[in-house]
Image (cartoon, rainbow, N blue to C red):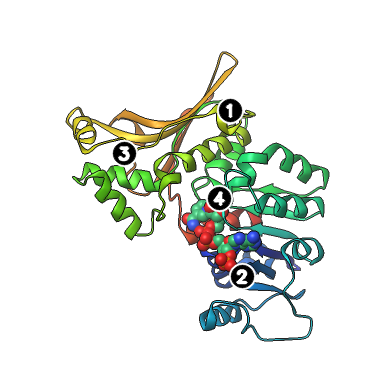
Amino acid sequence: MKNTIHRIALIGFGTVGQSLAKIIAAKNADLKQLRHTELRIVAIATPGKGSLYHPDGLDISALFTALEKDGTFAGYPDSAGLERGMDNLPLIRDTNADTVVEVSHTDMNSGQPALDHCRTALAHGKNVVTSNKGPVALAYADLSALAAANGVRFLFESTVTAGTPSLRLARRALAGNEITEMRGILNGTTNFILSEMEAGKSYADALAQAQSLGYAEADPTADVEGIDALAKVLIIANTVMGCALKKDEISCRGISHLTADDIAAAKAAGKRWKLIGQVKKAGGQTTASVQPVLLPLSDPLAQVMGTTNAVTYRTDLLGDVTLIGAGAGGIETAAGLLADILAI
Ligand code: NDP
């Protein structure tokens, strides 16, 4: 059986993009043998590292060798057919990539520049696979319509719970069920901080530890004030539960006001504070929120500690279904991108 060659353009080559490249290098032989599919990275663009395009594919180990030298693609070896320095939009539009993998930074206000990257790709008949929450949270309806009009796919499993398949579970495995409610631990940083506070740390010390381990940014606002979880609630509501919610329709409160005393009082009462993202449909109304919730220990979400994420879907046919797994990390997020690419 002949192998199908699937050509990929990567927009962004940070933690997640580089992890995807490493996975492709490690798994291509198996993918060829088991799935008759060969993945080829033909193009990459980032503002700081530069851009490269070769229609026959780039050499992944040479990419990393070049980055080791000076952090850019300047040292990538020249060869016939190699183009350097293409801007993002021409690279998305005019190369032979079948799929654009959008892994640039998230902007939850404008969705840019990722939104333009996604629109350009879909409008020019390229599939889009992304871990970037901005375009999905802010423009899912438009982008999925554009994909359908152009006969291509718009897939974004990694935007929620990284490669742990919380979206695919609902969209595929629970097909035929009505999902009436979703509750989730959708941000690993805050769950880590709450777990450390229960072990005896103050909020400030737990946050400092999350920062030193690379779980929280220097500016932790998006995590601790619930903004990252809100983006994921929006994505689940709109892509899985058929809602058409906007950002400002979701009430949002983070964990920064919780004190060591609050955590200790919950523990003494046999309960646990968790930052819960929720979407609930009842009587024709949808409500959605992100807020700390005091859970009994019998709730499966109460047992999820550290950076782990979890989602419980309430369904009409199966009752509650809970999925627990990794919610961040380069390889874990790239695993979701790979699953989307293979789904295409
Ligand atoms: P990084 O910050 O490590 O990398 C971001 C990349 O985007 C860098 O390569 C950067 O370029 C590039 N970039 C910035 N602006 C542009 C632009 N205008 N055009 C092209 N590339 C650009 O982020 P991650 O790899 O960690 O994350 C990638 C995406 O995945 C983000 O949207 C993030 O929110 C999402 N995500 C990440 C998870 C994680 O655990 N890391 C989990 C789930 C989702 P340069 O290299 O030149 O600086």
Q: In the rendered structure, which disc, 4 or 3, sits on the residue that comes first in sequence? A: 4
Front-lying residue, 138 or 8: 138
Name the image quarter holding residue 209: bottom left
Closest to the observer: 253 or 19?
A: 253
* Type of amino acid under label 1: Asn
Q: Earlier in the sequence, mark 4 or mark 2?
A: 2
- Mark 1 lies within 8 Å of ligand 1 (Cβ measured): no
Mark 2 = which residue? 28
Using the rendered view, name the quadrant where residue 110 is placed.
top right
Q: Secondary structure at mark 1?
A: loop
Label disc, if present, on residue 303 of the rendered structure: 3
CA separation in Å, label 4 and label 3? 23 Å
Task: Give the structural element (helix, strand or loop) at label 2.
Answer: helix
Instruction: Residue 172: tell me if it is visible.
Output: yes
Q: Which residue is mark 1?
A: 177
Cα gap from disc 3 to disc 2, whole angstroms: 37 Å
On whether ligand 1 comes within 8 Å of the CB at mark 4, the answer is yes
Q: Amino acid at mark 4?
A: Ser
Q: Mark 1 vs mark 3: give the one in front.
A: 3
Q: In the rendered view, would you say 32 is above or below 164?
A: below
Q: Mark 4 highlights which residue?
A: 158
What residue is drawn where x is 48% and y is 43%?
228
N-terminal label among 2 and 1:
2
